[in-house]
Amino acid sequence: MRTTDLIPREFWRKIRDAGIDGYMVIVGLMIVITAVILALFAEFIAPYDPIQRVGPPVSPPSTQYLLGTDSIGRDVLSRLIYGTRTIMIVILISTVLSMSVGIPLGLISGYIGGKLDRLLSLIMDSIYAFPGLILAIAVAAVLGPGIYNTSISLAVVYIPTYFRMIRGHVLSLRETIFVEAARAIGAKDRRIMLKYILPNTLFIITVVFSLNVADAVLTEAGLSFLGLSVASPTPDWGFDLKNGQRYFLSGYWWPVTFPGIAIFLLALGFGLLGEGLNTILGKEEI
């Protein structure tokens, strides 16, 4: 089976005909798929145990330690591979939580309107007014370190984004002809929202998901750098970046360089995917 057969042919045709935006989606997908593979098969790919000392401290990259060792003597490559799993778990949990809350609330608020819409919009705007990283730091500081607490912190940050995007689109959809026709034949509000309106918001959900995940990668790394995410010795890119930066000026560049590159590439992958899909699906919507 060819790789292209795993993607619906119609969608693949749109990607192929989209020019530079299609290439952005393809490159983004390649980066994301690579990260998923590393996260799923870390035990088989990593050459060493990521939390055990395997060599001399801050040993430079060599044939034995491809990316060198950190200040404790742990293999940097192994920690990068296992760190992929950590950040992907956090992103997955936080995304599911934020979508599970933001999408239904946005759907209900935009369709029903009235006092409920004003109340929910006021609450979400109040949350959205805080810078994402500052809000995540505040929530993480209250909840404490840990994968699940970090996921909740990120979910709180991105719930208003899903709410605002879905609500805005529902406000325009509820006055369309097909919704009016559904009301005319006696369809209940719940059926109209789930069967007629929600499917028409999927392209927005896809784009918001991709762009939010790209931002979540940087936010999670920021929390880890500040010591508010996972606890040591769990492999984490932001945590390793913090530990390595103190040795950078002494000439030990590898403990900080490779985690930084990993954070950049994963954020870039999701960013390219989101921007490409935004343009392609936006054209289809028009």
Image: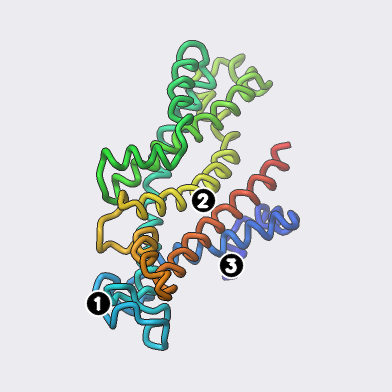
- Which mark is nearer the camera, 1 or 2? 1
Residue 51 rendering spot, x and y as whole percentages: 26, 70
Instruction: Answer few, some or many: residues within 10 Å of disc 2's Cα (few below 14, many 20 plus, some between 14 and 19).
Output: many
- Which mark is nearer the camera, 3 or 2? 2
Image quarter in which the N terminus is found:
bottom right
Residue 129 rendering spot, x and y as whole percentages: 48, 29
The residue where tag 3 is placed is 3
Q: Amino acid at mark 3?
A: Thr
In the picture shown, does residue 232 fall above or below 222? Answer: below
Dot 2 lies on which element? helix
Residue 81 in view (yes/no): no
Instruction: Answer few, some or many: residues within 10 Å of disc 1's Cα (few below 14, many 20 plus, some between 14 and 19).
Output: some
- Which mark is nearer the camera, 1 or 3? 1
In the picture shown, does residue 50 fall above or below 202? Answer: below
Residue 230 in view (yes/no): yes
Residue 56 rendering spot, x and y as whole percentages: 28, 82
Dot 3 lies on which element? helix
The residue shown at (46%, 20%) is 122
The residue where tag 1 is placed is 53
- Decide which of tag 3 and tag 2 comes sooner along the chain: 3
Instruction: Answer few, some or many: residues within 10 Å of disc 3's Cα (few below 14, many 20 plus, some between 14 and 19).
Output: few
The residue shown at (43%, 29%) is 127
The residue shown at (54%, 26%) is 167
Q: Amino acid at mark 1?
A: Arg
Q: CA distance from mark 1 to mark 2?
A: 32 Å
Instruction: Report which quarter residue 43 is drawn in.
Output: bottom left
User: How many circles with numbers are drawn on the protein?
Assistant: 3
Q: Amino acid at mark 2?
A: Ala
The residue where tag 2 is placed is 214
Q: CA distance from mark 3 to mark 2?
A: 24 Å
